[in-house]
Image (cartoon, helix red, strand yellow):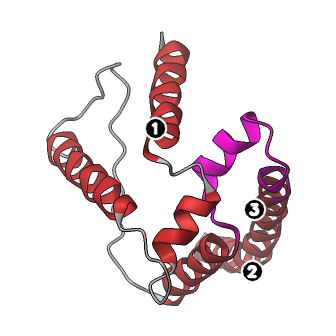
Amino acid sequence: MYLFCAFLAGLVFGLGLIVSGMASPAKVLGFLDLAGRWDPSLALVMAGAIAVGAIGFAIAVRRPLTLLQTPMLMPTTRTIDRRLIVGSLLFGIGWGLAGFCPGPALVALGAGYLKALMFVAAMIVGMLAFDRIEERRIQPVAQAASVRAGAME
């Protein structure tokens, strides 16, 4: 049941991206081109998505379990730090250059767009690089904690 619901949610999300035009890099780049021929239509799509998401989160934070009876895991960090800012900047730069963000890129990949294939390949390389950097960043912290725990025994 869980996999079926995940598939159904992904299908609805993908169809919404296609219908709204979010899977079209030209439409997205038109929205981002504030100095040229700006296309404000995606602002309405985003406003609608934010409204629906806000209602969903308001309901979700009050529930201990999802509708499928799995634990409701909500983010707890509210800190705006350097990592968040740099990641947001990189996301925005990539979105502006390619006209894709991850969800629409996967939809466009399924539709056979070569540009989406290049974007998804670069996205995977970026995720792998992030994992490597995180491993190196966390490893010394974990070792220090292990040493401290050993010293306390």
Mark drawn on residue 102: none
Task: Please tell me whether mark 3 sits on a helix, a strand or a loop.
Answer: helix
Which of the two discs, 2 and 3, sits closer to the camera? 3
- Magenta residues span 98-118
Q: Is residue 117 on the magenta stretch?
A: yes
Of labels 1 and 2, the one closer to you: 1
Q: Which mark is residue 140?
A: 2
Count of numbered tags = 3
- The quarter holding residue 124 reads bottom right
Asked if residue 26 is positioned above or below residue 134 in the image, the reply reads above
What residue is shown at x 25% (from left), y 51% (from top)? 48
Please name whichever residue, 26 or 88, is drawn nearer the observer in this view of the structure: 26
* Residue behind mark 3: 127
Label 1 CA crowd tier, 10 Å (few <14, some 14–19, many 20+): few
Q: Give the Cα distance between marks 2 and 3.
A: 21 Å
Residue 25: x %, y % from top left: 63, 59
The residue singled out by tag 1 in the image is: 19
The type of residue carrying mark 3 is Met
74 sits left or right of 85 in the view = left
- Residue furthest toward the top? 1
Looking at the picture, does residue 38 appear above or below residue 119?
A: below
| Residue 20 appears left or right of 135 | left
Give the residue furthest to the front. 37
Q: Amino acid at mark 1?
A: Val
Sort mark 2 into few (<14), some (14-19) or many (20+) by Cα contacts within 10 Å.
few
Number of the front mark, 3 or 1: 1
Q: Residue at x 38, y 26 (%)?
A: 70
Instruction: Locate residue 33 relative to residue 58 in the image: left or right.
Output: right
Q: Earlier in the sequence, mark 1 or mark 2?
A: 1
Q: Who is closer to the viewer here, 97 or 120?
A: 97
Q: Between marks 3 and 1, how big is the CA–CA gap?
A: 28 Å
Q: Position of residue 1 (x, y in %)?
A: 48, 9
